[in-house]
Image (spheres, rainbow, N blue to C red):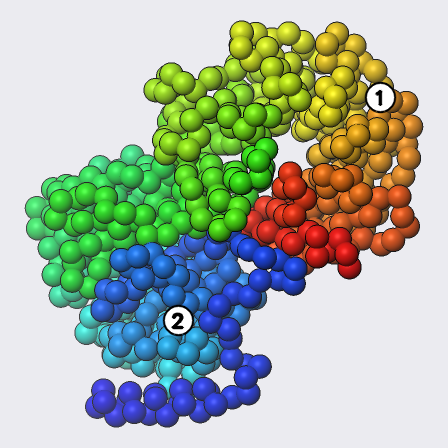
Amino acid sequence: MRDKLYLVFAVFLTIFANLPSSFAQSTHQPLPENAVMRLGNGWSTAIHYSPDGKHIVVGGKNGNWIHDIETGEVLKLLTDNESAVWSVRYSPDARFLASAGADSTVILWDVETGELINRLVGHSGIVSSIAFGPDGTTLVSGATDGIVQVWDLITGEQLHLFFGHTDKINSVTYSQDGKLIASGSKDGTVCIWSLQTEASNSDNNLTCRTSVPVNSVAFHPDGKMVASGGNDMNVILWDTNTGKTIRTFSGHNDWVRSIAFSPDGELLASCSDDTTIRLWDVKTGEQQSLLKGHTSRVENIVFGPHGKTLASEGLDGTVRLWDVDSGKHLRIIAEYPDVIYSVAFSPDGQVLASNGKDNIIRLWETETGNRLNRIALASDELSTFLTGVTNLTFSPDGEILAIGRGNDAVLIPDFMAEKTIHTIPNADDSIQTIAGHIDLVRCVTYAPDGKTLATASADGTVRIWDIQREKEIQMLGAHTHWVNCVAFSPDGKILASGSVDNTVLLWDPSTGVQLQLLEGHTSSVNSIVFNPDGRILASGSGDTTIRLWHSQSGEHLHTLTGHVNSVVRSVAFSPDGQTLASGGDDANVHLWKMFTDNPPTILTGHTGIVFSVAFSPNGKILASGSLDGTVLFWDFPALDTE
């Protein structure tokens, strides 16, 4: 019977494969026009092993990336370029891939050709979880609309609709015999649905109740037990016939995000916001192994088909591989940076540093795009918000990487050595911490001579530090709200600061005397930059404009308007001073020719807010970092001649 179903299924797919080429999707994500390189694949949300164990697919912001499990090489990208992926699964025969996400649909892909075969439409919310039936001809989906749907993949029609949950569904799965489906919901219940009847309501299920949201469910291979993991930090094993608790696995000290049984059913794996993965003996309930390596919460885990390895995906932007028998971390298969908040070129232009929401600083070789190093920032006992990096910059001699982290500025001299930076105490004596602010440091910048450092903080002050003595030499406190940004003029004689109070202040950094108050913005000033000769200052604001000022007189020279209904997040001058680049909430990069009335050149390609723009020192590359988790390199000379 199964062979006949697959024959029909294959005919169905052949029909769809011969649709016009415009319906088929590219197997590689094309670069936007004038972009020459992309760093990072965007943030990840889901993983799944291929049935033969040779590949792993990672779903996320920009589609489904298929990696070689041994080398980590990207083999293929399956994307419709329309919405983020929240769940992804291989079919049992590995010929097809299903992905689901924010657009409320489930997409079926041909793995070999990369073609989009079908789109299943029926949910009215984000599709958060999917699973293939054991024969590959059906698929179950659960969504934020609280409905469980079962699909016939041969016809594309709905076979079952199950109503019973009262909140969004976080996880769905099939039993190995295909007779049962389990679903876990934010409403605190695990529902076990029978596919043996036609009923499509709460009368057709066995409900297992917990007191907290359920994030993940998994059937034991024998189908007699189902496990759930949730916000009570426990994993619970349930009897599928009675709905009674068989055993509770306790050990995590934060929410459990994902669980999985080993293929032989002897082990149960769980991962948590506590950054760990735990392997449990199903029969005894004892913890067998504690797997540590992720530096932030672990979102997903999946056993390899033979049960020898386990793959994990975490909020630290890494997909990792583990040996199940020893519990050892084998390698990082792939990296998926989260939101990119800041980018900065080294003074020689050979390295680009980036940081983001995942608490990882990444150093990239600008010529090849290869990642040279990663520096992890351990959250320790504090929240990510307090310990994350706000921005970064290189010292003028390129020897030190400075970051704003929490209430401090942190100077990292040996930034090419892989390390983890802790809060307090700091295990690396070479790392210099400059402390004094009483709220988040929003920006750090070096004076041109490299001897002093300026910091801007949410405590409303700008502080200037003697780096060698680690001593505060000026505290500038005239702003009435957070100070978002700070910049030295090229000769170091003027310091500018921009604030949530909508103003820009100009200071004499040697005396701390306020030189000018620049007013005109009607919202927060988010970024400021001097042109190369220091005569012009540009400020980008939440009021959607960029203002140009004379740095000596404080005179308002011009207002640039082009980011329509979009906060301006970052501004940067080209090394020759002829072009100003800006990035904003419209996901675009704007290039403004100075001293002309020409409209800006608009660079499109990001799919989220552009938080940071930076020119390489030789002016050949413009880098932009985005909410979409990628950095794009643009060929600036080509753009400059257009």
Say if 1 sits above or below 631 in the image. Answer: below
Residue positioned 70% across, 26% down in the render: 487
Say if 450 sits above or below 72 in the image. Answer: above
The image quadrant that residue 514 belongs to is top right
Residue kind at label 1, given as amino acid type: Leu
Q: Which mark is on residue 589? A: none
Say if 295 sits above or below 108 in the image. Answer: above
From the viewer's side, name the closer residue of 100 and 200: 100
Element under disc 1: strand
- Residue that sits furthest to the left in the current view: 284
Q: Which residue is mark 1?
A: 517
Q: Position of residue 39 (x, y in %)?
A: 51, 51
Inspect this view and state whether residue 123 appears.
no
Residue positioned 75% across, 53% down in the render: 640
Residue positioned 53% across, 21% down in the render: 409
Quarter the C terminus occupies: bottom right
Sequence-wise first label, 1 or 2: 2
Element under disc 2: strand
Q: Position of residue 450 (x, y in %)?
A: 61, 19
Q: Which residue is mark 2?
A: 98
